[in-house]
Amino acid sequence: MAKSSRPTNSESPLQLLYPDLENELALTRRVLERYPEGKADWRPHDKSMALGALATHVAELPRLAATVLKTDEIDVADRQRNQPAKNSEELLRIFEESVGMLMPAISAATFDDLGKSWTLKFGGRALFSDTRRTLMRTLLINHVIHHRAQLGVYYRLLGIPVPGLYGPSADEPVWPGCYVPGMKAHPSFCARMRA
């Protein structure tokens, strides 16, 4: 008998649609923990966003997602830009506050809530509209992953160790047996895994 694609009474939208959300937020926290003090204005190119603005934007994205869940629209022309975080402690405080707004909102959301449309405007003009369900994936999860990867490039260029997220990084080899806290792996095994 084929499994039904309809949710059971025990499956929440969070469990069914976004089972990866908590892990992605935890990985994002690992990246934000590396934010360097005194480098907020640094940018790898004139056209690039400054490190402080980019990292603060990443930290605030869960708050934006909570706003999507609680409102029908926002007009970003009316928003006040926050100052970039000065250090990792301030950045993590912003992130934890944002996650603290998101998790109760998404945990309480019903399938009907997520099926409703939401609109982003600028100066009264609609920039885009989509369902909240889709926007939780694109405006939150995919958006965070995109900018988190940018932060990894910034960190690499600044000589800041880049955390391994879905696998190893040059700074954190996480292959089985190569990165186990408190244990040493056989060097030839690690060399083969990295090759």
Image: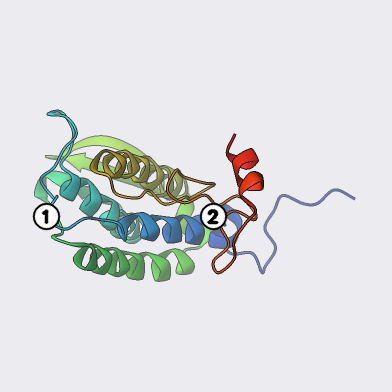
Judging depth in this view, the residue of 108 and 93 nearest the camera is 93
Q: Which mark is residue 132?
A: none
Give whichever of discs 2 and 1 has the lower sequence position: 2
- In the rendered structure, the answer to whether residue 192 lies left or right of residue 165 reads right
Discs 2, 1 touching: Cβ within 8 Å: no
Q: Nearer the viewer, mark 2 or mark 1?
A: 1
Q: Quadrant of residue 56?
A: bottom left
Q: Tell me if mark 2 has few (under 14), some (14-19) or many (20+) residues whose alpha carbon lies within 10 angstroms of its own.
A: few
| Residue 166 image position (x, y, % from top left) | 53, 47
| Residue 120 image position (x, y, % from top left) | 26, 43
What's the residue type where badge 2 is placed? Answer: Asp
> Quadrant location of the C terminus?
top right
The number of numbered badges drawn on the structure is 2
What's the residue type where badge 1 is placed? Answer: Gly
Residue 42's place in the image compared with 19, above or below, is above
Judging depth in this view, the residue of 177 and 18 nearest the camera is 177
At 27% across and 44% down in the image, what residue appears? Answer: 159
Q: Quadrant of residue 11?
A: bottom right
According to the image, what is the colour scheme of the structure? rainbow
| Residue 30 image position (x, y, % from top left) | 39, 59
Q: Which residue is mark 1?
A: 38
Judging depth in this view, the residue of 14 and 132 nearest the camera is 14
At 55% across and 59% down in the image, what residue appears? Answer: 13
Residue 29's place in the image compared with 159, above or below, is below
Q: Which residue is mark 2?
A: 20
At 45% across and 46% down in the image, what residue appears? Answer: 137
Q: Give the spatial CA distance, label 2 vs label 1.
A: 33 Å
